[in-house]
Structure formats: C-alpha cells, structure tokens
Image: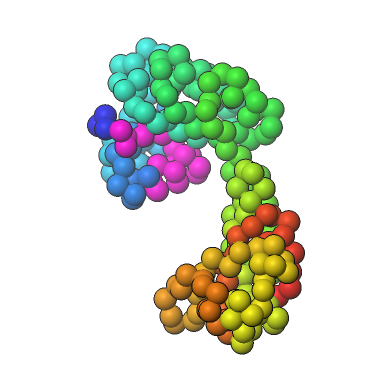
Amino acid sequence: MKSSDSVVVIGLGRFGGSVAQSLYRLGHEVLGIDENLALVQRWSSRLTHVVQADATSNDALRELGIADFRHAVVGIGSDLEASVLTVLALHEIGVGDIWAKATSEKHGRILERTGAHHVVYPEAAMGERVAHLVTGKMIDFIEFDDGFAIVKTRAPIEAQNRTLADSGLRTKHGVTVVGIKRPREDFTYARPETLVQAGDLLIVSGPTEKVEKFASLT
C-alpha cells in the first residue's frame, strides 16, 4: 500500500474517521492509525488497513512504512500534545504532504511551525457554513481561502423569466452564474441565452461578500 494515492490517517475520531472513510470511498488506499483499540476494531473492516500504534513515535511510524506515504492526515484534536508531536514525527521522517486538524488559531500556528503543510479548522468552517445556511437564503455555501465563494441559492425575482444576458446579473451584482438546477431536470451549465425560471436553483460564484449580497435578494 505505497502508491501515490495512498493516505495515512492518524486519529480515527469523528473528523479523522470521516476523512478516512471518504478517501476510501473515492478509491484511495487508506491506512488508519489510532492508539484506541476500540476505534481500531471499529474501523478495521472499513478501511484498507488499520493498526493500533503510537503515532508520536518516529520509530513506530518508520516500522509501519509511513515514510513511503505521500499524504498524511492528522485528525487528533482533543490531545494537543499528541497532535503536535505526531505532526513533528511525520515531518521528521520525511512525509511530504501533511494535513492536520486544529481546534484553535494558536493550535494551528504550532502545527504549521512543527511541519504541517495544511491546517484545517473543521469546527470553525462548519460553524460559518451553518450561519450562512440557517436563514434559508443559501442552500449551500463553500468559501475558499482567497475570499472567493460558491453558493447554491434560489433565483431572485429580477432574474426569473429572463435570460442571463437580459438580466445582467454579472454586471449588476459582480457574480457569475455557473449553472442552473431545475426540479426533476439535470444540472445545466449557464450560458448567456439560458432562461431562468421561478423555482430554479442557481450555482453562483464570486467574491464572498458579493455572493452573500446576491443570495440575500431571494
């Protein structure tokens, strides 16, 4: 299990387990590692391979061949010391792409300084996503690091029964309609001549602030 698509996921709690399972479903070979025997047993039949080990130990990681993995995900969140030491151990044995979960900004800075190439804040990201969805203005929301977002929202009245060229949404609101999903029909990529109807869902991209304002029109 040492192909370029192989991933080691350390910490099989709620976050790490979810990442590991998603990677496995996508066709990747996944090695799961956790110190908790109960978690190891729970995941043993759901991933490519699962082992019980102390991931803070360089020697343990080397014995498992982790240095040959291109990607590693550290899903440890509750034990800050174990999280940091695991990232450090992965860095020291030469893993080239380390992703790590952080529970706070301070935790994230420490992870970056000890070798993490990518730090994710799942609780904060989910909190922001829910805040955008709770009012019903957006049906889905994804924001990228550079202030760019993609949202799924209902077509505002000003766009209904008009083509995208006629409504001029991009000129008026600074957003781009990427596609349209109509009930019981397939997703359609947007074109200037695409006619928007009442009840259509629009996939819209653009600067976060502008897509937020556009979604508020619905």
Please state, as top left, top right, bottom left or bottom right, where the N terminus lies in the image: top left
Q: Residue at x 57, y 38 (%)?
A: 120
Left or right, 175 with respect to 79, comes to right
Q: Is residue 190 above or below residue 183?
A: above
Q: Is residue 141 above or below residue 41?
A: below
186 and 34: which is toward the camera: 186
**Residue 96, picture quadrant:** top left
41 and 24: which is toward the camera: 24
Residue 56 percent location from the top left of the image: 46, 18
Left or right, 91 with respect to 202, comes to left
Residue 113 percent location from the top left of the image: 60, 19
Q: Residue at x 60, y 60 (%)?
A: 205
Q: Residue at x 67, y 74 (%)?
A: 168
* Residues drawn in magenta: 4-22
Left or right, 159 with respect to 19, comes to right
Q: Is residue 197 magenta?
A: no
